Image (spheres, coloured by chain):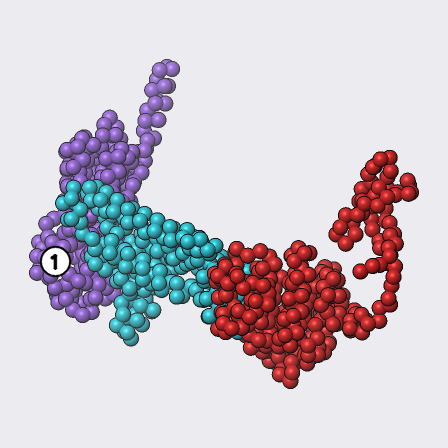
Amino acid sequence: MIHIDIKKPLLGVDGFMQLDINININKNEFIVISGNSGSGKTTLLRCLAGLEECSGTIKVDNILWQDNTNKLKVQKRDIGFVFQSDALFMNMNVLDNLLYVNNDMTLALRLLDMTNMSSFQKTMPANLSGGQKQRVSICRALMKRPNILLLDEPFSALDNNIKSKLYTELLQIHNEFNLTTIMVSHDLNEVYALASRHIILDNGIIKKDENLSELLNNIEVKEQIQLDAKILKIININNQKHAIVNINNKFINIKLNNNKCKVGDNLIILSELFI
Amino acid sequence: MFKLFILILISFKLSASTITVALASNITYAMPTLKKEFNKIYPNINIRTIISGSGKLTAQIKHNAPYDIFMSANMKYPNNLYKSKYAISKPKIYAKGKLALLSFKQYDFSNIKELLSSKKIKKIAIANPTLAPYGKASIEFLQNIKLYKNIKNKIIYAQSISQTLLYSLNASDIGIVALSSLKSDKLEDYKINKNFVEINPKHYTSISQGMVLLKRAKNNIDAKAFYDFILSNKAQEIFKNYGYDI
Amino acid sequence: MFELITNLDFTPFLLSFKLASITTVILFILCLPLAWYLANTKSKLKPYIETITALPLVLPPSVLGFYILISLSSNSPFGSYLDEVFDIQLAFTFNGLVVASIFYSLPFMVQPLQNGFESLNKNMIESSYIAGKSIITTIFKVALPNIKPALLTALVITFAHTIGEFGVVLMVGGSIEGQTRVASIAIYELSEGMDYTNAHIYSAFMLIISFIVLLSVYMFNAKQKQKLVGFK
């Protein structure tokens, strides 16, 4: 159980604001924190890790991580941290990056296997792709066998087709290592793919805090859905007007019955659902 | 009438002239007085002085530095210049330099040999003998009083006689400097037999300082005027007052 | 020609290299924590400390030498304290040159190291702390290995700068054979004394040795860069 009650003055997009967070986090929760740029999400994560100063109390499983007089050093906190990018030790190969944290070869090989990185043991980080680097970062974060895993927008710099694979791997790790995971992300797909609880920050305070497992159970069954799309381009095929729209990152070609449509118009598309 | 006017104009221009004299640094102290006396007779001749080590000046002259007269701290360099035709007059001795022991601390100078060998004196500043004529004489002095071998390891070498003065006044325990420097008003706080003492000239070959007229001053009557002045009785008196032998 | 070379007195060169080596080692030990501090601190004192460490760059060597001479000589309060209590004399000794060189070459060790540390990815350093490693372990196992070019620059330039040191030594040295008559002073005295032949020989020798040292260092640097990307 993590108890956070902290305050910190921040420089946001619109000037000074106060980060003011008071929450409790239960074991094994997978929390995704989202919010606009400058709302304090990364700062909250870094304060929890001990990488930044803040006032207030942080207590983890009856161990005091900080109060107004004492602060537990970063090195002593039971956490793993995955940064957004470029945090691997560039002077060591993949395997050494892991062994630097903890000289446990068995654990290292197991983690590399779970993230499909076994064949890259001797590769230097400079020769890895973005997705591969993040996989190694996740493995490295777990070498200490922490109870808490913190991730700061770990997948935001990656392609969509890589992301879904990584979601699966991360969830597998979360479950197998019995972690309490807190991830900052502004991608709603990640919320729905991974989170058991979703927190939205705005101007340093919690605007919304909902338990998603309940939410997901309460969504009504639909047989027909409504999609919104914008017209990107209008073309002429055999004297028939077609509109090119983008739905879910795919380009769809739709016959137009209405000649009054132009580029930039919003369309409402009704579709029947089949799996 | 017009011709007279031009002549007078020209003579004014000629008489408001500048000559450049290259001086060995030990003459720095005597120079202001020499200039003053010279300008009493020749008020319109301006003397510009370049002060440096004799060796440096000689090298510069050999590279056609714009000097009219060279007053060295020895005879070797002027002889060299005369032989290689950079100087147009045979070197003449204008003064003989003398040595003094100087410290900014106070010592008992009654027995120099004892003083220099004592534990109190840890560093003795001397001008580098291969570069400075005064340094060469300093070593000669130490050898002649049979002290050189004993105190060799206490010697620190300054690059010039001026740097020797700097060391003696700031850093080393004692130094062998040009006696003429003691006549400068900047050192009037230093008392004879307390801070300094003249070294008996019999212990070293006199430091004959030579002067030459340089190639550049070939038809320069002003330069010749100064040259003659330096060898005159008046100037020689001044040198004597500044601690030189004549 | 060969005789000219065998008749060379090598003492000034050995002295110069000895001085440069000892100075570089001492400066590395002193400046590593200083550079790390400057790269990581947010203190308001930072500009003042940076100015002080950069002063030797701007001051004429003769000014630096003059002040060092005055403060180290056994007539100064500091110098006489060392003399009376520890029987250490610094002016006109090799050790005094080391002290002077430390001041003279300080910025050349601090600045490349500081720039190197500042260019490091902060998250990488933080990852090491999160892994439970101390600051010292992080500096030696993560920070320094990742700034090898800057580290090399710092060491090489400090070394080279100290070899070339002249104005300060001229003031503080006293040109004592085997103690303070380093190569730059020896060459100066030869040229002053119009012994141009030997001045040429000494200078050419210095040039060749310095060239070889620098070249091997930069070649090593290039090889290191290759290692980072895994080429053999």
Give residue A261's position: percent from left, percent from top: 88, 42
Mark 1 surroundings: few (<14), some (14-19) or many (≥20) residues within 10 A: some
Tell me: residue A248, above or below residue A43.
above
Colour-to-chain, purple: B
Q: Residue at x 15, y 33 (%)?
A: B83
Give residue B205's position: percent from left, percent from top: 10, 49
Q: Residue at x 22, y 44 (%)?
A: C201
Q: Which residue is mark 1?
A: B142
Q: A214 left or right of B185?
A: right
Q: A47 left or right of A199?
A: left
Report in which chain the residue with disc 1 lies.
B
Name the quarter where the C terminus of chain B is drawn.
Answer: top left
Q: Look at the image and tell me whether residue C115 can be seen.
A: yes
* Residue B51: quarter of image: top left
Give residue A260's position: percent from left, percent from top: 91, 41
Q: A111 left or right of C145?
A: right
Asked whether B124 or A139 is in front, the reply is A139
Residue type indicated by callout 1? Leu
Colour-to-chain, cyan: C
**In the rendered picture of this protein, how many numbered marks are placed on residues?**
1
Q: Residue at x 12, y 64 (%)?
A: B150
Give residue B177's position: percent from left, percent from top: 21, 55
Name the quarter where the N terminus of chain B is drawn.
Answer: top left
Disc 1 element: helix
Q: Residue at x 86, y 35 (%)?
A: A239
Q: Look at the image and tell me whether residue B37 can be seen.
A: no
Tell me: residue A10, above or below residue C223.
below
Asked whether A42 or C34 is in front, the reply is A42
Colour-to-chain, red: A
